[in-house]
Each structure stands twice: as structure tokens, then as C-alpha cells.
Image (cartoon, rainbow, N blue to C red):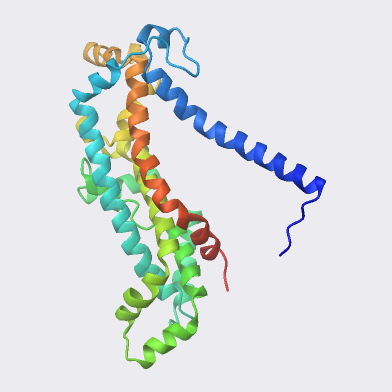
Amino acid sequence: MVRETTWGSRVVDGALVVLLAGAALLCVLPIWYTLAVSLSDNAAASAGEVRLWPVGFNLGSYKEIMGDTKFFGSFWISVQRVVLGAGLNLIVTVLMAYPLSKTTKDFPLRNVFMWTLVFTMLFNGGLIPWYQTVKSLGLINSIWGLVLGNSVPMFNVILVVNYFRNLPKELEEAALVDGAGPWYMLWKVFVPLAVPVLATVTLFSIVYHWNEFFNGLVLMSKAEHYPLQTYIQQLVVIIDATTMNEDQIKRMSELSNQTLNAAKIFIAMIPVLIVYPFLQRFFIHGITLGSVKE
């Protein structure tokens, strides 16, 4: 393919570069601002004097976090949730996607199961039935309540189904000729070839489990069981002091330090910022091939 180098094409390329650079800057600015606030003096942060650079450089917030057992307790709960949740999501996704990628000749009830699963993407039983189900299983105040309640990411399943369906049929036929069974074919043929889409859906699961806070708020009745994002949400939520008792007011006043909260939020961003570059190279390829049907 010959690339045009006319004056007009160069102007368009330059405009696109400027546009994308501006979009990237808009994505980075909130992270940079949070870091600037976390490194600023509390009085300057409370007065709204911090812009893009720290005012009254101060590492006191990070020193304070080092002794905050509740923060690190919530951090550890979120780490467990990500490891268990993303691992379970990946296993369930692969085991569901493989049979659903077959034709109706090989799997006669394929369409029935597929439409049933798609229906769950459009409609659900509601918050109260979901909560009652989790409660009846004894998963309140349990890490498994956060993990098992979202163990079947249907969107991820559809991506992997379409990716499997786009793999060459000759590979499966050759494996059958060599005597490979379904399990061998799945783990030795399909999974190794599906690394891009599996890395992509794993990234989706990691980001979801790390950032989700509502389930922790609903399913955990004790603050010591909160995952990290639920803990942070409690720092920034607006609460009516007239409905709180003396102990709650005292606790919230201790947590109202803007620089300390900004430091906690910034630290909470770091794991995803570290993981994303390693999986990003698979992202476009996995999404492209997993989002279209043959």
C-alpha cells in the first residue's frame, strides 16, 4: 500500500496527532492532579490552591498511609478478589465459550443456550433477589460473595466464542484425526491460539474486580471486609452528619483529609497502571477478532 504524502494528507495527519495528544492529556490530567494534591500541604489542598503542581510539598500523607491498617486490609481484600475473580472468570469463560463455538450439528442445543445467556445480558432478576440469593448461600461478609456473584461475564464469553469460531477448522480436523479428545483439543489447540482474546477478557475482569465498589458496599456489613474501592468510596461520599452518631462523626472527621484521601486514591490506581501495559498489546487484536462473526 502506497501512503499519500500530499500537503493535505500531512495536515490531516498533524491534526490527528494533535487531537490524540489532547485526548491522552485529558486522560492523564486527573491522575496527575490527584498526585499533586496528595503531595501538597493539607491547608493548600483544602483551600483549593492546588492545580497541576504540589503546593507546599509534603510526604506526610504517604507516611500516614504506611500506618493505616484499614487501608492495607482493604487493599489485600481487593488483591484476593482480583486473583480469585479474574481466575474464575477466565476458567468459566473458556469452558462456556468452547462448546458454544460449535455448530448446531456438533451441539444441537447450542442456540438455546446461547439465547438464554444473551437474555441475561439484557434482563436480570433485580438487586433484591440477587442479594437474597447471595445471603441464602451464606456469602455475606465473604470474599466469595464478591467473586461468585459475577463469575459469568457474558460479554467476555461472546468475545471468546466468536474468536474460537474464527480459528481455522482444519486445526480441529487435524487434531481429531490424530485422536485428540475435546479436553485435549481445548487446552492444547484452542487456548494457546486464543491468547490475545483471553488476555483481553482477563484485563476486563481485572479492571472490573479492582474498580467495582457497589457489591462490597451491599454485601459487606463490616468495614474491615470492604474491598479497596468501597473503602475509598466511603472517604469521598457526601454524608449527612445529622444522621450519624458521635463515633461516626469522629471517624469521618479523621478521614476528611484531602491530601490523605488523594494519596490513597493514587495508590489504588497503581496496580491497574502496572498491569495494563503488559496486556495492552493483546487488546486491539483480541477485541477485533473476538467481536466479529465468521
Percent x, y of residue 174? 41, 89
Percent x, y of residue 183? 30, 78
Report the quarter where the C terminus lies.
Answer: bottom right
State the residue at coordinates (26%, 34%): 226
State the residue at coordinates (37%, 20%): 38
Horizontal side of 36 relative to 216 (left or right) equals right
Position above or below: 99 against 180:
above
Horizontal side of 177 relative to 169 (left or right) equals left
From where the camera sits, is residue 88 visible? yes
Position above or below: 200 against 239:
below
Q: Residue furthest bottom?
A: 177
Q: Give residue 20's quadrant in the image.
A: top right
Report the quarter where the N terminus lies.
Answer: bottom right
Q: Give residue 214's quadrant in the image.
A: top left
Q: Nearer the viewer, residue 148 or 206?
A: 206
Percent x, y of residue 49? 47, 9
State the residue at coordinates (51%, 64%): 290
How many numbered callouts? 0
Percent x, y of residue 105? 48, 86
Horizontal side of 282 relative to 22 (left or right) equals left
From where the camera sits, is residue 235 visible? no
Q: Nearer the viewer, residue 3 or 230?
A: 3
Position above or below: 74 against 175:
above
Q: Nearer the viewer, residue 21 or 262?
A: 21
